[in-house]
Amino acid sequence: MIIDCHGHYTTAPKALEEWRNRQVAALGNPAATPDVNELRISDDELRETIATNQLAKMKERGIDLTIFSPRASFMAHHVGDFQTSSAWAGICNELCHRVGRLFPDEFVGAAMLPQSPGVDPATCIPELERCVKQYGFVAVNLNPDPSGGHWKSPPLTDRHWYPIYEKLVEYDIPAMIHVSTSCNPCFHATGAHYLNADTTAFMQCLSGDLFKDFPKLRFVIPHGGGAVPYHWGRFRGLAEMLKKPLLRDHLLHNIFFDTCVYHQPGIDLLTKVIPVENVLFASEMIGAVRGIDPETGFAYDDTKRYVEAAALTPQQRHQIYEGNVRRVYPRLDAYLRGRGR
Amino acid sequence: MIIDCHGHYTTAPKALEEWRNRQVAALGNPAATPDVNELRISDDELRETIATNQLAKMKERGIDLTIFSPRASFMAHHVGDFQTSSAWAGICNELCHRVGRLFPDEFVGAAMLPQSPGVDPATCIPELERCVKQYGFVAVNLNPDPSGGHWKSPPLTDRHWYPIYEKLVEYDIPAMIHVSTSCNPCFHATGAHYLNADTTAFMQCLSGDLFKDFPKLRFVIPHGGGAVPYHWGRFRGLAEMLKKPLLRDHLLHNIFFDTCVYHQPGIDLLTKVIPVENVLFASEMIGAVRGIDPETGFAYDDTKRYVEAAALTPQQRHQIYEGNVRRVYPRLDAYLRGRGR
């Protein structure tokens, strides 16, 4: 089977955005804050937004299942305070959970966390636990920069983040390291901030020794690892200069890259440079880049075409499509086995 | 001939760093600021640091000439105020000029600018003019983030930067877009901040219409363009979504990428994806990555080996090594012609 480990609910009904707009508008005036229960979206509406969008494309492209989390650019952790993020994360996660219940064979949830700038990440644990225990979610998205492009949190190797890591290890779920929108005018969200965050997160891990403290912690770095595979020689050399072990030993038991790279030469490089057991199939469809590539006549984000055309054996392709994802997301594997898959 | 368009004086005599340390130590106490004339470095010392380092490696690797600018990570524009940067840039540029006079066949200067956070870039013009007119420098390094990792300046497309661009066009010199060190603990300087800045600068240009205002302005984006060539499909798709022309028309008359990518698959991708006329040979030697790659037995930053092994015709290789650099740096071309080369 083919598992896309990186999908967001980018097509949620308009009512969601309207509720959020009301929440944001009320920031200076708490009495006007909308109640969570004021958002009403029917199952039919959810079904419609999925069936005509993500699911239609999955069928068209031959993708069997998507790990599905709230829209990354809408997490906007920089907005308001912890209460703001908490209500918003609760709503967004619940919608992904409902999508998973409506389409149990095609969608399994991953959580956004109610992060907020300057707030102890431990405050995210109740929502994380709810999503794992009540919803059966199989992963979380962790934002290394809840300030939205100002980068005011400590590096991912700092003890600041350890309460989250302890829970991830306890539940045996990976974190996709995924920023949200940028409110720094220097950084275009999907054209700079996302890729920069991927590179930054990798280099933070390279500089530190986080995985000595958490040998079972697993990070998925999306968007093909930002600039990392393209500069793999640079990173190998920097590891040597920083007196770290070889990257394979230092990081590759714990860090995985997805295949959200939207042209053939990029996927060719990724699959050539990074050991195949560290590459996870993903498309982030329907996401940042929605057009048809005039050079191929196919969607930019139809990454399955690139993986099909890459110089891989059928066995390696199977690892990327399914085997690696089941290994990195053991709760997904258990869920699938429970359904005889 | 083979021209390396990206070299820094990373091996300057210790006295330079000592002068800088005194300057920084005096920040709270202007009376203690060392005078520029207190720094004394002899020609022999300069000769020694070059002959045993950059020049030795150039000879070993077969590189004929390097465009040589002050050490990027030491620019540290975030330190002090405009006066601080002004004295420091003046000293560093003069040293590069002296290296060029001592080795006129092998080194030609490029300027650092006395940028300072929050200060009008127009204040850099006197130093820029001095370097071009008195020193014969052929380019400048422009730091898009003088705050050193906090990204508080407007994007490169903002009118904020136009006074610099007007001078670059007037003198027909390119700017290499090159940040300095990071004082944001999230960003490792050479492992994250440099690459992020390259990606960010490209995306700023993609999002705007700067080159409509300055059709002759030329930017060199170092380190192989950060994440850009690896994600070329993403950027082509984003240009379409932002209703911009094809990247070739929108940006590639004005933006060039160097070859500071430290492994073969990276150079293979760069030279495959980016039109050959937009690729400029460079190594940034002696720079960020100084070791020997155990996988090849050669220096990571010996980028000529990768260009030699890439699938290029001799004519294309000549463009990358020399033709493109002479076109993008016309003052270098004039200098070389004046010397019968």
Image: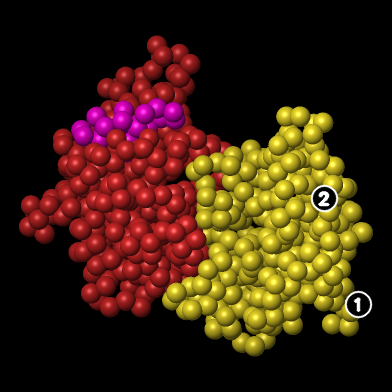
Chain colours: A red, B yellow
Residue A310, image x, y percentages? 37, 75
Q: Which residues are magenta?
A: A110-130
Left or right of residue B277, residue A283 in this image: left
Quadrant in which residue B10 is drawn: bottom right
Q: Is residue B112 above or below residue B55?
A: above
Spatial CA span between label 2 and label 1:
33 Å
Q: Is residue B2 above or below residue B48?
A: below
Give the chain of mark 2.
B
User: Dot 2 lies on which element?
Assistant: loop
Left or right of residue B126, residue B211 in this image: left
The lab-note entry on whether marks 2 and 1 share a chain reads yes
The residue under the point 68% across, 51% down is B74
The residue under the point 28% across, 47% down is A214
**Count of numbered badges drawn on the protein:** 2
Report if residue B163 is visible in the image.
Answer: no
Foreground of the two, B163 or A8: B163
| Three-letter amino acid code of the residue under disc 2 | Leu
Please name the residue that numbered disc 2 is placed on. B39
**Residue B338 numbered mark, or none:** 1
Bin the neighbour count of mark 1 within 10 Å (Cα to Cα): few under 14, some 14-19, many 20 and up: few
| Three-letter amino acid code of the residue under disc 1 | Gly
Q: Is residue A309 above or below residue B93?
A: below
